[in-house]
Image (cartoon, helix red, strand yellow):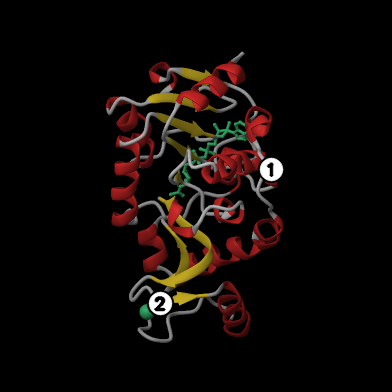
Amino acid sequence: TGVDRLGEMIAEARTIVPFTGAGISTETGIPDFRSPGGLWSRNQPIPFDEFVASQDARDEAWRRRFAMEETFAAAKPGRGHRALASLYKAGKIPAVITQNIDNLHQASGFKADAVIELHGNTTYARCIGCARRYELDWVKSRFDSERQAPDCTACGEPVKTATISFGQAMPEHEMRRAAELSQHCDLFIAIGSSLVVWPAAGFPMMAKHAGARLVIINNEATEQDDHADLVIRHDIGETLGPFVGN
Ligand code: OAD
Ligand code: ZN
C-alpha cells in the first residue's frame, strides 16, 4: 500500500523535508481554506492593500480573527504534526516548511527556527510599519475599548496578525531557507496542501528538480500529482499515525 511504500522511502531517506498546508491541521479542529466548509467558502480573503487602505477592512479582519480565537487556542497538534515531530527528533527532518499560521508545528516539538513559516503566524500581531510585536490580548482590549482595530503606539501604522495576506510581500529569509531546504533533501513530502498558492507551491518541484523524491499526501487530487513519485490520496492522520513515535 501507499503507507508501506512511504515507510520504505522514509527509511531510505537521509534528509526529509516536509511541506505542510492546512490539511494537516483539520483534525485539530482548524478548518482549511478550499474544502467545502473551508474558510474561503465563508469569507473572501481581505487583500493586503485593502487592509492598509481601509479602517473598515481592518475592523473586519480583526473581528474574523477574534471569532476564530477559541478554535486556535484549543487546537492541539494532530497525528500528522506528531509524526513529523518524531522524525525531527530522530534527526531525519532538519526543518519543516509550512504555509500554516497556527503554530502547531512548534507546539508539537519543533524548535522555532526549525519551522519555516512562509505565510507567517496568526498567534500574535505586528505593526505593518515598524514590525513591533503585539500580543492578541492587547489588540482585543484596544479593539473593545475603542471599537475599532488599533494602530501601533510607536509609529501609528496599522497592527495586523503576523500573517502574510494576498498582495503582501513574502518573507525573504523564510523564502531563502525554504529554497535551500528544498534543494538539499532526498525526500520531500507535501502534506495537506491544494498546491495552488504561489510562490509557496513552487517548492515541491524545486525539490524534485534538485533530485529529491517527491511524495504528495492529500485527500484530493492536486495539479502536481503527475510529478510525484508517490501520491497518497488519503486522510493525513491515518497515513502518518503509524509514524508517531514515543
Ligand atoms: P487548502 O485549503 O487550499 O488545501 C488543503 C488541502 O488539504 C485540500 O486539498 C484538502 O482536501 C486537504 N485536506 C484537508 N483535510 C485533510 C485530511 N484530514 N487529510 C488529507 N487531506 C486533507 O490549504 P493550503 O494549501 O494550505 O494563504 O492553502 C494555501 C494557502 O491558501 C494558505 O496558506 C493561505 C490560503 O489562502 C494565505 O492566506 C496567503
Ligand atoms: Zn509601528
The residue under label 2 is 132
Q: Looking at the image, can residue 222 be seen? A: no
| C-alpha separation, residue under disc 2 versus residue under disc 1 | 38 Å
Residue 94 image point, x, y percent: 43, 44
Front residue of 47 and 165: 165
> Considering only vertical position in the picture, is 234 above or below 195?
above
The reply to whether the C-beta atoms of the residues labelled 2 and 1 are less than 8 Å apart is no
Front residue of 178 and 124: 178
Horizontal relation, residue 82 to residue 170: left or right: right
Is the residue at mark 2 in contact range of ligand 2, meaning its CB lies under 8 Å from it? Answer: yes
Horizontal relation, residue 165 to residue 123: left or right: left
Which labelled disc corresponds to residue 246?
1
> Considering only vertical position in the picture, is 170 above or below 27?
below
Horizontal relation, residue 201 to residue 190: left or right: left
Q: Residue at x 33, y 31 (%)?
A: 207
Give the foreground label among 2 and 1: 1
Q: Callout 1 environment at 10 Å: few (<14), some (14 to 19), or many (20+)?
A: few
Horizontal relation, residue 179 to residue 78: left or right: left
Type of amino acid under label 2: Arg
Q: Residue at x 57, y 84 (%)?
A: 146
Residue 65 image point, x, y percent: 59, 62
Q: Looking at the image, can residue 219 be seen? A: yes
Residue 89 image point, x, y percent: 55, 46
Of labels 2 and 1, earlier in sequence is 2
Q: State which quadrant residue 32 falls in.
A: top right
Ligand 2 appears in which quadrant?
A: bottom left
Number of marks: 2
Q: Residue at x 54, y 41 (%)?
A: 90
Secondary structure category for the residue under label 2: loop
Secondary structure category for the residue under label 1: loop
Which labelled disc corresponds to residue 28?
none
Type of amino acid under label 1: Asn
